[in-house]
Image (cartoon, helix red, strand yellow):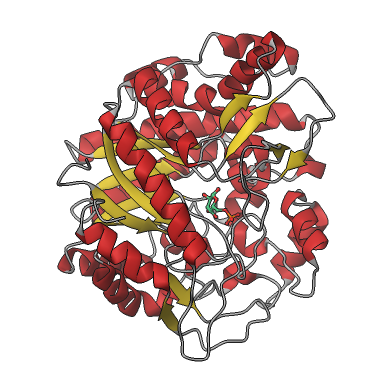
Amino acid sequence: MFPKEFLWGGAIAASQAEGAWDEGGKGIDSQDLRFFDPSWDRAQRDQNRNINMTSERFETALASKDVGHYPFRTGIDFYHTYRQDIDLFSELGIKVFRTSISWARIFPNGDDEKPNEEGLRYYEDMFRYCKEKGIKVFCTILHYNIPVNLITRYGGWKSRETIKHYVRYATTLYERLGDLVDYWLPFNEINCSRFNPYNGCCLIKDQEADYINSIFQCTHHQMIANALAVKAAHEILPGSMVGGMIARFTTYPATCRPEDVMETILEENYKNYFYTDIMARGHYPSYAKRMFKENGIHIQMEDGDEAILCENTVDFLAYSYYMSMVASTDKDIEKTSGNLVSGNRNRYLKMSEWGWQIDPIGLRISLNEMYDRYQLPIFIAENGIGAKDGLEEDGSIHDPYRIDYLREHIRQMDEAIEDGVDLIGYTMWGFIDIVSCGTIEMSKRYGVIYVDRNEDGSGSNKRFRKDSFYWYKNMIRSNGLDL
Ligand code: BGP
């Protein structure tokens, strides 16, 4: 049984939705530089997902004013349509809206003396309008897109300068928007750097002599920034709720061979718990020593860093959950795709059109594991299925696969609450169609709201209610009883 005040909602990210990349005083950010060619076939699109940013791509994009090949520059034009869209969110009956703020809309270069007033006013009006509609705000401070100037001038997250500018950015948001935001998330999926270093910590592989070491040095700086963001929030906004988020990779052993079971523990530790242990327990876990030794990782720490981590742990944990994975010591096991990572196939599970393994019970399993480990309230900050939806002549969109997916995951959340898990809320991902983050495709739709926009830039940009819109609305109204 879902608690009466359970927070049903939806989530998006600024770079995947807003567009208006050079309007309102916004500076250019790291996601504005990600290239996509609508003429690419499936194989080229999947290959593009895993391509690391290169210096050549970076420089070409930086010099280009094109929008047709940079879908994050136009998104779904949410920058101009947010009021109508929030009207639709209100009709849907959501209790909470998760979105991120574009750092470059607040500090166009990241190190500017003063914040950009027009940017602050934009988010103030958006969040105030949510409040008028009785919708709470769940704000992600950084969802991958940092001002490019911080990369070119300081080296991005490799530099402690970026920590300083990040904390000033977060503090500016607390001071200006503190009374409008209910839940804060300093970083989206802080473990992303391990799997997609450009999105996660804006590293450009061909500029790194020791890539893996740079990844973990950046992660250390992000962990310090995360802890300082918690500290500043508690000082400026006493009683504020600040969370720590990862992309959760629930992993099972491929067999009961002890080697596979041990492999599972290592994967769970290295892909998931390493990050939540630091944010929730306040120190590097003991198993990190071996991971660092085996990968030749040497992190530069400054005096006081351990105290910063120890004294400023998060108030709740959040994670994205889309699929599960299998760990095996058998290198020939069949592979499949997934969120941020590719992995081993689980033959007991169906897959989405993008090869993501659909596993509702895995959500219950991960909720029990995370709650048992940390005894902190949990927020499912992302969940959903990416699919190619069709817009019918009459404006209807039939997406029974999405209703099935949501229904089964919501059922398992209900089970986890019965298991004793303290679950705050659930924000389904991309509840209004947005540009996909991994493959940069508009055709990979997650929403209950259809956006008439195609990858070649055509389309009316109008919004349509899918069948799942009415299902989700009714489900929320019944507080999860009517599935
Ligand atoms: C998560 C990101 C989101 C989102 C989601 C779905 O990792 O936090 O930004 O995009 O994955 O992935 P995709 O858009 O690649 O289908």
In the displayed structure, 473 sits above or below 376; it is below
Seen from the viewer's position, the closer of residues 163 and 6 is 6
Residue 285 x, y percent position in the rendering? 51, 13
Residue farthest toward the front in the current orientation of the protein: 348
Residue drawn 80% across the image and 23% down it: 330
Residue drawn 65% across the image and 15% down it: 256
Residue 399 x, y percent position in the rendering? 49, 68
Residue 342 x, y percent position in the rendering? 71, 41
Residue drawn 66% across the image and 70% down it: 70
In the displayed structure, 298 sits above or below 465; it is above
Question: How many numbered dots are placed on residues in this image?
Answer: 0
The answer to whether residue 85 shows anywhere in this view is yes
* Left or right side of 426 for 187: right
Seen from the viewer's position, the closer of residues 228 and 79 is 79
The answer to whether residue 169 shows anywhere in this view is no
Residue drawn 72% across the image and 65% down it: 35
Q: Quadrant of the N terminus?
A: top left
Seen from the viewer's position, the closer of residues 205 and 343 is 343
Residue farthest toward the right in the current orientation of the protein: 332
